[in-house]
Amino acid sequence: MYRATPIDPQLQAAADAIPPELGLITRDMVAPLRAGMAQQIPAATKPTIRVDTRWQNIAGEAGDSRVVVYRPLTQREAGPGLLWIHGGGYLFGSADEILPAQLAEKYRCTVVSVDYRLAPEHPFPAGLEDCLAAYHWMLANAVKLAIDPTIIALAGQSAGGGLAAGLALKLRDSGACAPAFQFLLYPMLDNLHATPSGQHVDHYVWNRQTSLNAWAMYLNGTPGAVASPYAAAARATDLSGLPPTFVTVGTADLFRDECIDYAHRLMAAEVAVELVVFPGVFHGAEQFAPEAQISRRMNSCIDEAFGRFLGSGNS
């Protein structure tokens, strides 16, 4: 029997300030919520990041898509590259984010952020196709991007983590050049939420019914246990041959048990895994309340993991 995990007391004020309209997201709310989110963070409030930021159109089998390329103003020699996939429940979000720019600046590396197509207008496999095209574009343009093509990682938060996990499976099964690592930050993996934490209905920020609605929009229906593992990685039966993986999640997150289970299954498949679970953290809490002590610990842990891959000696 699952019992709701109390959130960290320093996160309570942020939890109480979450807009009530996020309590249950339905299809007809997606467009107005997107418009509201676009107005909440004016450009003047974004911190200045000293990187070259440019949008790039790339061609893929499903048509053109876009990425944002973040490169440090003083580029180092070819080294690791990072394909960043933003979160937003497969419904929201943009490639123009602060974290990938910060990583490019701090570690003097190239980070490519995918502006993938969103559901419900573009259900699976549209978003995955865009991520796949971006990955192949990075490989094909590695010299121009100052990337070692043998050292490219996949990374994403929430739905972005789910896309990263699905992309890793797709690349393995297609025999493509394998990513060197995957960073799954509280990834959205299980369209059934068939876990103890997934059965609890009242999680902060992203609750069970909202998530099931988002999955139905992303999957263009409710295929249940026969959903593609490239969409819902929890459906994959074989996790062997996947790249080393970093997984983190909070104990008060809807995705807690599906993330832990996925990490355990990766370990059982002899994949090198680092799993870090933070007590009392709800979904995305380290972004809602970055000054909280637990958020600082979580962000520090995530940054340290990226640093080990991207090269902390270059910071």
Image (tube, rainbow, N blue to C red):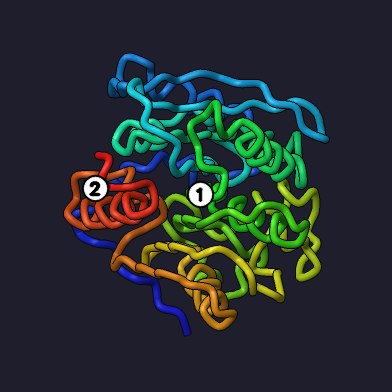
Q: Nearer the viewer, residue 145 or 95?
A: 145
Q: Which mark is residue 151?
A: 1
Q: Secondary structure at mark 1?
A: strand
Give the x, y percent position of residue 298.
28, 56
Q: Which mark is residue 13?
A: 2
- Relative to residue 143, is residue 215 depicted above or below? below
Instruction: Please identify the quarter of the rendering in which residue 174 is found.
Output: bottom right
Give the x, y percent position of residue 293.
17, 54
Q: Quadrant of the C terminus?
A: top left
Residue 15 in view (yes/no): no
Q: Secondary structure at mark 2?
A: helix
Residue 222 in view (yes/no): yes
**Residues under labels 1 and 2: Cα distance?**
41 Å
Give the x, y percent position of residue 212.
64, 57
Q: Indicate which label's residue lies in the foreground, 1 or 2.
A: 1
In the image, taking residue 158 as reference, residue 237 lies left or right, namely: right
Q: Residue at x 71, y 47 (%)?
A: 218
Name which residue type carries label 2. Ala
